[in-house]
Amino acid sequence: MQPFKSIVFELTLYYMLLSVGLPLIYAVTYHLPAAGIFSLDWLVVCILLYPLVLLFSALRYSYQRLRGHQRQ
């Protein structure tokens, strides 16, 4: 069973990849400059959505614990 901190770290890495990758995909698709996509608004959105990462981490950890207890 993975510790809670490693689950949070893993999901944080996924979230960081998405928060950097999605604007770049948008910029390439619509032929926009990549520097114009990363704005203060996008940073605020990323920061405000980060608690969802913690919530999903807690759900994944609790599901993993329940599954581990059911196997025993």
Image (cartoon, grey):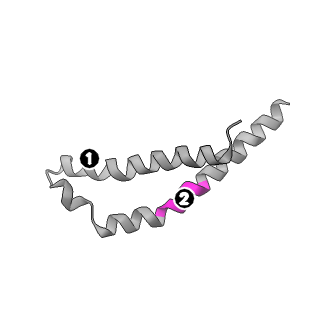
Task: Tell me the residue at 39%/48% (across/down).
Answer: 18
Numbered disc 2: secondary structure: helix
Task: Tell me the residue at 44%/65% (across/down).
Answer: 47
In the rendered structure, the answer to whether residue 27 lies left or right of residue 13 reads left
Numbered disc 1: secondary structure: helix
The mark total stands at 2
Q: Which amino acid type is marked by label 1?
A: Ile
In the rendered structure, the answer to whether residue 21 lies left or right of residue 37 reads right
- Cβ–Cβ below 8 Å for labels 2 and 1? no
Q: Is residue 53 magenta?
A: yes
Q: Which residue is mark 2?
A: 52
The image quadrant that residue 52 belongs to is: bottom right
Image quadrant containing the C terminus: top right
Q: Is residue 39 magenta?
A: no
- Foreground residue, 7 or 65? 7
- State the image coordinates of residue 53 (x, y, percent, origin top left): 54, 55
Q: Residue furthest right?
A: 72
- Magenta segment range? 49-55
Q: Which amino acid type is marked by label 2?
A: Leu
- State the image coordinates of residue 26 (x, y, percent, origin top left): 25, 51
Q: State whether the magenta stretch is mostly helix, strand or loop.
A: helix
Task: Tell me the residue at 71%/35% (across/down).
Answer: 1
Q: Residue furthest top?
A: 71
- Foreground residue, 5 or 67? 5
In the rendered structure, the answer to whether residue 43 lies left or right of residue 12 reads left
Q: Which residue is mark 1?
A: 25
Spatial CA span between label 2 and label 1: 22 Å
Q: Name the N-terminal-most of marks 2 and 1.
A: 1
